[in-house]
């Protein structure tokens, strides 16, 4: 239970520390339950989206729902995406990339990356039928976090522990922890209409491509890489779902 509290406290701004004291070593295993934290962020986003769609135009409703998610998470992964794009876009070698990614200031690459990310995300989700949009949002969040969790089992950490932003290196998942992570990641997708289950494939491909890219560019991963991978996996989920939705409507 304390590992679950650690995951919720790490990936959201919910003050679980008021409920229980969490040992520091539990934070090394938070990736095991990353998709479980996604149940909370995904469910809250989906519920806000459902309510907003009753009274607002689709684009405004989706923007409102993801604004609430930003408040719930503190923009943790979005910060990682911006730093990742800044580093990969402006870095000339491994050391330069890691130096840029560690800088708390956002650059032009990061700003442009976030703008296009949110435009694409909101546009895709706004295109879904109102009846299934919340279900897709609820499914995409934990599944993307599961796909992102592959990073810690396939790549070494790119920095020394004392150089990490949060002074933390995640432990690799055991087989039982991996299966639990998979379970939490896939269950929300089982509520989707059958054609939309195809959307599970592209995030896994995206995560694989990100892992190969990070191995080539910096020889490992950082926390920023994890956040960026999750958001790009989620965006690819929405791309797939948007295509499926359009094809289903046409045929």
Image: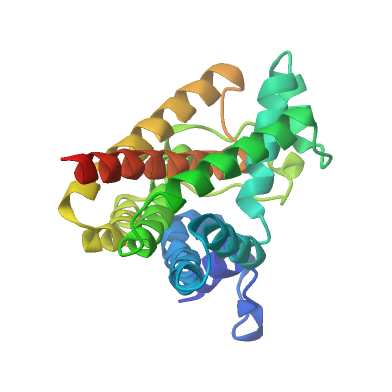
The residue at the far bottom in this view is: 19
Q: At which x and y percent is residue 175? A: 30, 50
Q: How many marks?
A: 0
- Determine if residue 169 is in view: yes
Quadrant placement of the C terminus: top left
- Determine if residue 25 is in view: no
Tell me if residue 70 comes above or below residue 40 in the rendering: above
Q: Can you tell which quarter of the image residue 192 is in? A: bottom left
Q: Can you tell which quarter of the image residue 22 is in? A: bottom right
**Which residue is located at x 24 percent, y 48 percent?**
196
- Is residue 169 or residue 189 the one in the foreground? 189
232 relative position to 251: left or right:
right
- Is residue 2 or residue 88 the one in the foreground? 88
Quadrant placement of the N terminus: bottom left
240 relative position to 172: left or right:
left
- Is residue 223 or residue 85 the one in the foreground? 85
**Which residue is located at x 61 percent, y 36 percent?**
116
**Which residue is located at x 22 percent, y 60 percent?**
190
**Which residue is located at x 45 percent, y 62 percent?**
38
Tell me if residue 148 comes above or below residue 219 in the rendering: below
Q: At which x and y percent is residue 79? A: 69, 46
Q: At which x and y percent is residue 29? A: 50, 57
Q: How is the image coloured?
A: rainbow
Q: At which x and y percent is residue 201? A: 28, 38
The residue at the far top in this view is: 92
């Amino acid at each position: 239970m304390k590992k679950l509290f650690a995951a919720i406290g790490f990936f959201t701004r919910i003050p679980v520390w008021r409920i229980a004291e969490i040992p520091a070593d539990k934070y090394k295993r938070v990736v095991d339950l990353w998709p479980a934290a996604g149940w909370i962020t995904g469910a809250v986003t989906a519920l806000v989206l459902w309510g907003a769609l009753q009274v607002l135009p689709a684009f405004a409703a989706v923007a409102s729902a993801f604004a609430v998610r930003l408040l719930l998470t503190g923009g943790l992964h979005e910060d990682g995406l911006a730093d990742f794009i800044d580093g990969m876009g402006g870095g000339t070698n491994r050391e330069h990339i890691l130096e840029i990614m560690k800088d708390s200031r956002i650059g032009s690459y990061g700003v442009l990356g976030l703008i296009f990310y949110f435009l694409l995300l909101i546009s895709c989700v706004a295109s879904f039928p109102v009846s299934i949009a919340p279900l897709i949002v609820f499914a995409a969040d934990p599944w993307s976090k599961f796909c992102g969790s592959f990073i810690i089992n396939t790549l070494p950490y790119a920095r020394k522990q004392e150089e990490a932003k949060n002074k933390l290196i995640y432990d690799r998942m055991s087989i039982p922890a991996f299966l639990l992570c998979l379970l939490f990641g896939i269950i929300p997708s089982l509520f989707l209409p059958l054609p939309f289950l195809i959307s599970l494939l592209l995030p896994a491909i995206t995560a694989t491509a990100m892992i190969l890219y990070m191995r080539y560019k910096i020889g490992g991963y950082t926390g920023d890489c994890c956040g960026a991978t999750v958001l790009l996996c989620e965006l690819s989920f929405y791309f797939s779902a948007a295509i499926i939705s359009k094809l289903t409507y046409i045929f």
